[in-house]
Amino acid sequence: MAHSSFAKHPRLSRVDHAVLFLFLLGASYLSSVAWHPAPFWVLLSALGAGYALFWFAVGHRIVKGRIYQSAIAHFPKKYGENGSVIAQEPRISRIYKKPIDFKGYISDRNNRNLFISGRSGSGKSTLMRYVIELFPESSKTIFSFKSGDEYLKLGMPILRIAEHAGYPFSDREAFVQSFLVTYPISSQGVVAASVPNLLRTVLKGSGSWRSLRSEIELALAREKSASVTRSALSFIQQKLADLELASRPCPLPTGDVVLDFSGLNESAKTFYAELHLRQTWHSIEDGSPDPMRHIIIIDEAHRLLKSEATIFGEVARLIRARGALWCGTQNYSDLPDYVRNQFAMHLLFSTKSERDLRALKEINALLPFTATELRDHHFTDAAMRELHEAIPIYTADIAGFQDRPEVYIKPEISENAPIEAKPKPMLDYRDRVLKMLENEASWPSKLAKEIAAQDGMGGDVPKLAVTRALKALREDGMIEKQLLMVEDREVSLYYRKDPAMSGLHRFMEKEVTKKLEKDGIAYELAKPGEDKPDIMTKDFDIEIETGLKHDIKEVERRLVSATKKTYVIVPTEVEMKRYNKAIDEAELQTNIYLVGYNSLKTLYP
Ligand SMILES: Nc1ncnc2c1ncn2[C@@H]1O[C@H](COP(=O)(O)OP(=O)(O)OP(=O)(O)O)[C@@H](O)[C@H]1O
Ligand SMILES: [Mg+2]
C-alpha cells in the first residue's frame, strides 16, 4: 500500500545532513593535502557533495506542485549508560522533501472518506482543492460557503443558491430534518418536542413559502393564547422567516457542480446545505456501485454536525460503495466519534483546541504535540495505521495552482416539467377549495366542475387535485365530511369546521327551502342572530341542526317554547339518536319531529 512506505522515513534532519556534508568536505580536503592524490577520499567527498547538491538543487524541483513529506515528529532515542533507552522530549525534525503519491494514498483503500481539520487559515481548503484536482474522472458536488472560496476557482460550474435555492417543499421530511439541523432541538427548550410534528402538519400540502406562512397563521389562530403548541408555532414562524428564499423547482446538474451558499444568512446556509446534501445523496444512492464515481465535498461540515438530525453520518457510512465524502472542519472534535470512524483519513492541520488535543491523545501520544507544533500549511494524517513513535508531516506545494474563471450556471427550469410542477397546482387547489367551502358545503365532483369551468380546462386534473386538496385539508382538521343525500344520490359533503358549522348549515337550509319551493309552500327565514326557528311556514317550523354543537341546550330552550309543529332536521342517524335522547330527557311536547337529512323526502307527509 502506498502509505505504508511513509513510516520508513530518513531520520536525519537538515542540520544532520549539513554536518555530514561539512565532515565529508573537510575529510576530502585533509586527505587531498596529506596523500596526494587520494582516490578513495576524493571519491567519497564527491559523493557527499553530489548528495547534498541533489537535495538542495533538485529536491525542491521534484516536489513542485506535489504533496511532499517535509518533516517528522518523533521521540529522539538516547541511550543511557546501561544501554537502556532514555525517554526524551518529542521533537520535529525537518527532512529533505520527499514527494508523495497522494492520489494512490487515497485510492489504494476501500474507504476513501477523508476529513481535514485545522484552525482557520491553516490551509484546509487549499489542500482540499489540491486533492480534488487529483480526481478529474469522478463527478463532484462541492458545498462551498465563503465568497471568493477556493472551490469557485476550479473552473467547475457554480450554482448560486442565493439565486437558485431549489424547491424545499417536494420532500416534507427533508424540510423538517433540515430545519432541525439548523435549529437543534437542544436549543429550543420546552417547546422542542412538538416542533417536528407541528412543522410536518403546517407543511402538509404547503407548496410555497406563502402558503406555509398562511398555514402557520391559521394554526396560530386555532390555538389558545398561552399553549405550548402556540409557543412552538411562533418559534417555527420566527425561524422560518430567516430561511425564506424564492423557491422554484431546480434540477441539479448531473456532473460536477459547486453549490455556492455564500450570500445567505448563517441559518439559511445550514438549512439549504442539509437539503442539498439529502438531494445529492438520493441522486447517487441508487446509482451503480463504483468506488470513485461521485465525491461529495463539504467544507465547514461543522455547520451540519450540530444536530443528529443531519444525514451527514448516514452519507459517510453508505457512500463508500459509490464514491466518497470529503469534508473540512475547524476542529478535529467537530465530528462525533461514530461519524469520525467512517473516515479513513484524518488530515490534521495545526490545532490548539483542548478538546481536539484530548481526542488526539487517545490515538497516539505524539499526536497532540505534533498538532500544536505544526506550522501553517503543514499537516499529518491522524488516522494512519502505522503511527508509532514517529509521525510524518506533509505539505503541499501549490506552485502549480491556476485559478480558472468562475462559471455560473442557471439551472434549466421547465415550467411544465411534470414532476416538479405537481405540488404547485395542488397548493393552489388547496387554497381555492378552502375558499370555496367558506360559504357553503360542497362535494368533490361539484368543486371539480366549478374549478374546471373557472380555469377553462377539462380532464381528470381538477378532479384529482380536488380530491387531494380535500384529503390534505381534512387531515389538517380544517374541514370535515358527511355522507348525505343530494339530488337522490349519496355524496360526501365537505364543509369547513368553523364553530357555527355555517357551511353545512347553509347547505342543509338551502336544500330544505328548495324542497319547500318545489312543494309550493311559502316560508320565511330567520334573520341572522334572530331568536327564531330557522325556517318558518304557516303550519310548521323547521330547525336545521348540524348536530355538531357540543351543547344542545340552546335548541332545547327553543323547542320547549315551540308552539307550532316543529321539524328538526339533523344530518345523520347518529345525530338523530343524540337529539332523540335529549328530547326525551327534556320531556318536550309531542309536536316535535326529528328528521334525518337523508329522508328529507318524508318531511310533512
Ligand atoms: N501549501 C500551501 N502553500 C502556500 N500557501 C498556502 C498553502 N496552503 C494554504 N496556503 C495559503 O494560506 C491561506 C489560508 O489557506 P486556506 O484558505 O486553505 O485555509 P483554511 O484552513 O481553509 O481556512 P478557513 O478555515 O478560514 O477556511 C491562503 O491564502 C492560502 O493560499
Ligand atoms: Mg477554508
Image: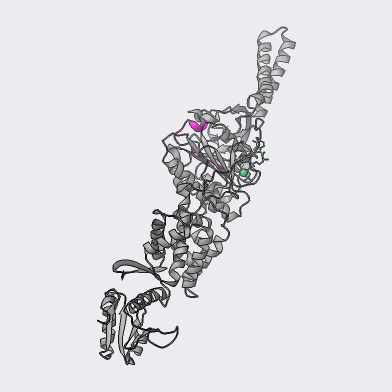
Viewer-nearest residue: 35 or 256: 256
Image coordinates of residue 370 in percent, x first then y, are 59, 40
> Which quadrant of the figure has residue 499?
bottom left
Q: Is residue 177 magenta?
A: no
Image coordinates of residue 125 in percent, x first then y, are 61, 41
Residue that appears at 59% across and 41% down: 409
Image coordinates of residue 37 in percent, x first then y, are 71, 7
Determine whether 63 is above or below 458 in the image.
above
> Which quadrant of the figure has residue 201?
bottom left
Residue 401 seen anywhere in this rendered image of the structure: yes
Viewer-nearest residue: 453 or 399: 453
Residue 87 seen anywhere in this rendered image of the structure: no
> Which quadrant of the figure has residue 72?
top right
Q: Is residue 114 magenta?
A: yes
Colour mapping used in the image = one colour
Determine whether 366 is above or below 183 in the image.
above
For ligand 1, give the image quadrant: top right
**Magenta stretch bounds:** 105-119
